[in-house]
Image (tube, rainbow, N blue to C red):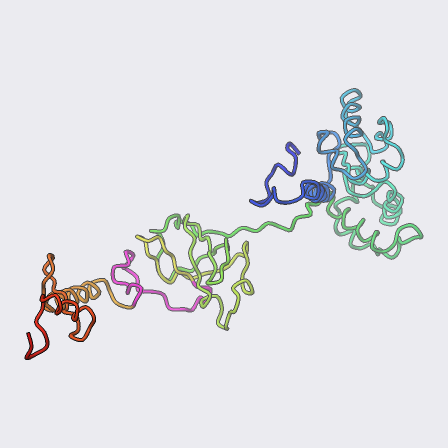
Amino acid sequence: MKIDPKSIGVGQYQHDLSEVKLSRSLDAVVEDCVNGVGVDVNTASAPLLARVSGITSGLAENIVAHRDANGPFTSRQALKKVSRLGPKAYEQCAGFLRIRGGADPLDASSVHPEAYPVVRRMVKTSGEEVASLVGNTAVLRSLRPADFVDETFGLPTVTDILKELEKPGRDPRPAFKTASFKDGVEKISDLESGMVLEGVVTNVAAFGAFIDIGVHQDGLAHVSALSRTFVKDPRDVVKPGDIVKVKVLDVDIPRKRISLTLRLDDEAAPKGDPSGEGRPQRGGRPPQQRRQGGQQRQQGGQRGGGGRADGSRQAPPPANSAMADALRRAGLTDGPKGKR
C-alpha cells in the first residue's frame, strides 16, 4: 500500500461524498482484501501490516523495527516478542501473517495457530509428516472431516482447514482463463467472412456485445445474433470476460467494422469484397442510386422556373394572400383578372 486508498479516485463525484465515510468504506475493502490474501510478515511494509486485523499503525512500526533489529521471523510464536503485541492482538492477526520457509510449514498457511492441534491429529491419522501432508490431495481427501470435530472446532472449520492444507496459500480469486486467438489473424485485413474464431467479451450494451478476437479492433455481435431465442437483455446471454466462439459475418475494412455472430451456422457475407463497396448502405440503396436520385431532384427544381440571382425561380404568392393585396395596393402587380 503505497498511497492512501482515497487518493486512488473512485469517480467524478468522489468529492461530493463525506470524506470520513468514504475513507472508512475504502479502508474496509482494502482490509478485507489484505486479510483474504494474507501478508508475508518478513517482507511486508508497515503501511501494509497496518491493514491486517488487530494491528495498528504503531504496532506495525514495532513489527518492522523488531524485524530489522533481530532478523526475519522464523515462526509465528516469535511475533509474541514484539513490543506491545499482546495476546489479543496476536489472536487476531496470527492467522493472516505468513512465514515462508520457517520452522513449521503451517506458518505459511492460513491455518490459525489455535487450530494446529487439529492438524496434528490429521497427521497422526494419516501417518504422514506435516510437510508431506500439506498439498497431498489424495491423502487429505481420504480424511473424513467429521472425525476431527471437537468442542472447539466444528465441521465448517475442519472443512476449511482441509481445503487450506490441500492448496496452502491459495489465491482466493477464481482461475483466470484467456481466449486462444487464431494464429495468423493479427489485423483486421486478415479476417475473412465465414471464419470461426475464439474471442473474449469486452463490453455489453443494449444493442449487442463487443468481442475481442485478437485483431486490435473489437467486433460487434448484434443482440439478434447472440441466441436463437428472443433476447431482451444481452447481459442475460453474455457478460464481460466470457470466452465465446464467434463467426465472422462481414468485415468493413475502411470503416473498421467487424460483424460477428454467436450462431455459428449463420450465413456469412460473400467473400472477396473486403472494401465494402458492393454492400448496401444504410437506407437500403447503394451510393450510385442515391446520387442519381439527388441529380433528378435538382433538375426538377431547375425546370420549375427562375427569378432569383442563382437562377432558380420563386413561386408567386397566392392571389388571395395578404402579401398579394399589399403588392396590388402599391401598384407593383396586376390586380385580379379584368382589373388594373
Check the image and name the residue furthest to the bottom.
338
Residue visible at 44% across and 61% down in the picture: 221
Q: In the figure, 67 relative to 19: above or below?
A: above
Judge by depth and name the residue closer to the eye, 240 or 147. Answer: 240
Residue drawn at x 25%, y 67% as measured from the top left: 285
Q: Nearer the viewer, residue 14 or 196?
A: 14
Tell me where residue 147 sits by quadrant: bottom right
Please state if 14 lies on the left or on the right of 295 as rendered: right
Q: Decide if residue 59 is on the left or right side of residue 25.
A: right
Side of 311 where 29 appears, left or right: right
Q: How many marks?
A: 0
> Does 215 sit above or below residue 306?
above
Task: Identify the residue at horizontal 57%, vertical 45% (top origin).
Answer: 11
Residue 276 among magenta residues: yes
Indicate whether residue 14 is drawn in magenta. Answer: no
Question: Which image quarter holds the N terminus?
Answer: top right
Residue 170 location (% of width, % of height) = 70, 45
Residue 171 in the image: above or below residue 331: above
User: Mainly helix, strand or loop, the magenta region?
Assistant: loop
Q: What is the span of residues highlighted in magenta in the rendered image?
A: 261-283
Image quadrant where residue 39 sits: top right
Between 252 and 11, the one lying in front of the other is: 11
Task: Name the spot of residue 280 as percent of width and height, x first.
Answer: 28, 65
Q: Residue at x 46, y 65 (%)?
A: 223
- In the rendered image, the quadrant that contains the C terminus is bottom left
The image shows residue 214 at horizontal and vertical percentages of 44, 50
